Amino acid sequence: MWMSEAYTEMERELLLQKVQMHMSEKRFKHVLGVEETAVALAEKYGADPEKASIAALCHDYAKERPDDEFQMVIRRDGFELDLLNWNNAIWHGVVGADFVQRELGIDDEEILNAIRLHTTGAAQMTLLDKIIYVADYIEPGRDFPGVQEAREIALVDLDEAVAYETKHTLEHLLATEKAVYPKTIETYNYWVAKHNRKGADLK
């Protein structure tokens, strides 16, 4: 088992209880699926499985908080005020890490950043960032066109899995005429469009 003395089964259970208190049963089941996937990816690609477990368990900690709570934290804690123009889809990651740090006492910046980026991605992502980003997309409870292909890619090339997820997320946002958060465009330009630039440079 991948547990160490620093992160015991008892500590994991305590974290599980705290997380479960703040979400629906359906959301909690998703969180467990993300943890299972993230730990497997961490073991495959050489990341810290304990950090993968903690980040996965906490990634949606703030997902079901009311909008006014996010808005209050954005104003109070010095976030860019442009965030007020967005919604829970962005807030629960970018601002949600603030809740995780304050309420759960998790101060590991690598874990907190993986939570911040799990919906938007970024041009520069650590191995843990990529693992949580991909695990959230492909966990066993997900069922949408292309998810099985995404799972297969993730087992072969994590960077390609990031690119696949980013491309299909952006396609969905465009198809549904949703606003695209700037960091999502940044992620697309780096992880997806870079392949086309490489090809152009070779001509």
Image (spheres, grey):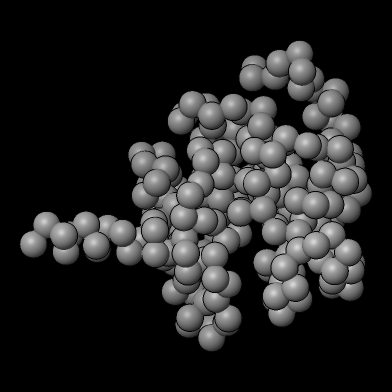
Give the tally of numbered discs.
0
Q: Residue 163 placed where, x, y %?
A: 40, 56
| Residue farthest along the top direction in this orientation | 5
Furthest residue to the bottom? Answer: 177
Residue at left offset 72%, top offset 35%: 108
Image-based side of 133 in relation to 107, left or right: left
Residue at (81%, 47%) from the top-left corner?
A: 100
Can residue 27 be seen?
no
Relative to 50, residue 136 above or below: below
Residue found at x 16% / y 64%: 200
Horizontally, is 27 left or right of 1 in the view? Answer: right
Q: Quadrant of residue 56?
A: top right
| Left/right of residue 137 with respect to residue 2 in the rendered view | left
Q: Nearer the viewer, residue 106 or 13?
A: 106
The image position of residue 27, as x and y in percent, is 76, 55
Split into 4 quadrants, where in the image is the C terminus?
A: bottom left
Q: In the current view of this chain or complex, which residue is farthest to the left?
A: 203
Please report the residue visible at 67 percent of the width from the left and 53 percent of the height from the top: 116
**Coordinates of residue 175 in the picture (x, y in percent):** 48, 82
- Could you tell me which quadrant the N terminus lies in? top right
* Residue 121 appears in the rendering: yes
